[in-house]
Amino acid sequence: MSLEQLASDMQNCNRCTLSEGRNKLVFGNGNPQAKLMLIGEGPGKDEDEQGMPFVGRAGQLLDKILAAIDLSREQVFIGNVVKCRPPNNRVPTKLEVAACLPYLYRQIELIQPKIIVLLGSTALQNLIGPEARITKMRGQWLETQSGILIMPTFHPAAVLRDPNKRRPVWEDFQKVQEEYLRLG
């Protein structure tokens, strides 16, 4: 199966109630052979309208962060824990996440990234564990059993709300750049 086939298979997904309110499913986008994958929480209003991840204000900041480490959207793959917008941008429920996680795991399996950046606590808690705390774990490398390096950091939306998070995110992405360059 390819990413294109998975995206096609998901277009009519109704595994949870989020599908009832969506305009467009937000599969994710970028390089299907990306060495670096970024995973956020879920689509917001702009993403739901355009069917693309991280296209609102947080996405514009993410683009600037990527540019600062000499990367572009075309070089990475950007996705989310859930593929449909939760009402009023609330945190997705456990049931909603459980319905979408198999798709995210399949994306990871197909892309085979070497590095995953988890953007925010929803991504961290659903991929690492419910007890994981972004304030304690951000900036520290984790590694999966299959050898994928994981860097948790604050979500760009959190940086927009709290400028004090800019420096920690910049430091985290410098570590990501260093590791990315090491991959060759």
Image: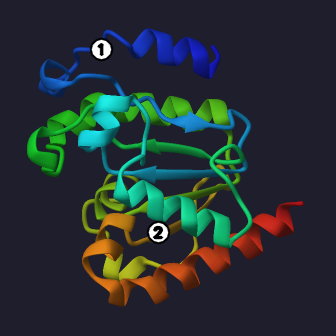
Q: Which residue lies under the disc numbered 1?
A: 13
**Image location (x, y in percent) of residue 156:** 39, 66
Q: Nearer the viewer, residue 42 or 138?
A: 42
**Image location (x, y in percent) of residue 129:** 33, 59
CA gap between label 2 and label 1 equals 28 Å
**Image location (x, y in percent) of residue 29:** 55, 35
Q: Few, some or many C-alpha atoms within 10 Å of disc 2 (few <14, some 14-19, many ≥20)? A: many
Is disc 1 placed on a helix, strand or loop? Answer: loop
> How is the protein colored in the picture?
rainbow
**Looking at the figure, which quarter contains the N terminus?**
top right
Residue 128 visible in image: no
Q: Quadrant of residue 100?
A: top left
Q: Nearer the viewer, residue 23 or 3?
A: 23
Q: Few, some or many C-alpha atoms within 10 Å of disc 1 (few <14, some 14-19, many ≥20)? A: some
Specify the label residue 152 is tagged with: 2
Is disc 2 placed on a helix, strand or loop? Answer: strand
Specify the label residue 156 is tagged with: none
Q: Going by the picture, which residue comes out furthest to the right?
A: 184
Q: Nearer the viewer, residue 65 or 126?
A: 65
Question: Closer to the N terminus: mark 2 or mark 1?
Answer: 1
Q: Residue drawn at (72%, 47%), measured in percent from left and top? A: 75
Q: Amino acid at mark 1?
A: Cys
6 sits left or right of 26 in the view: right
Q: Residue drawn at (36%, 50%), measured in percent from left and top? A: 56
Q: Residue drawn at (74%, 66%), measured in percent from left and top? A: 70
Above or below, 17 relative to 44: above
**Image location (x, y in percent) of residue 25:** 34, 24
Q: Amino acid at mark 2?
A: Pro
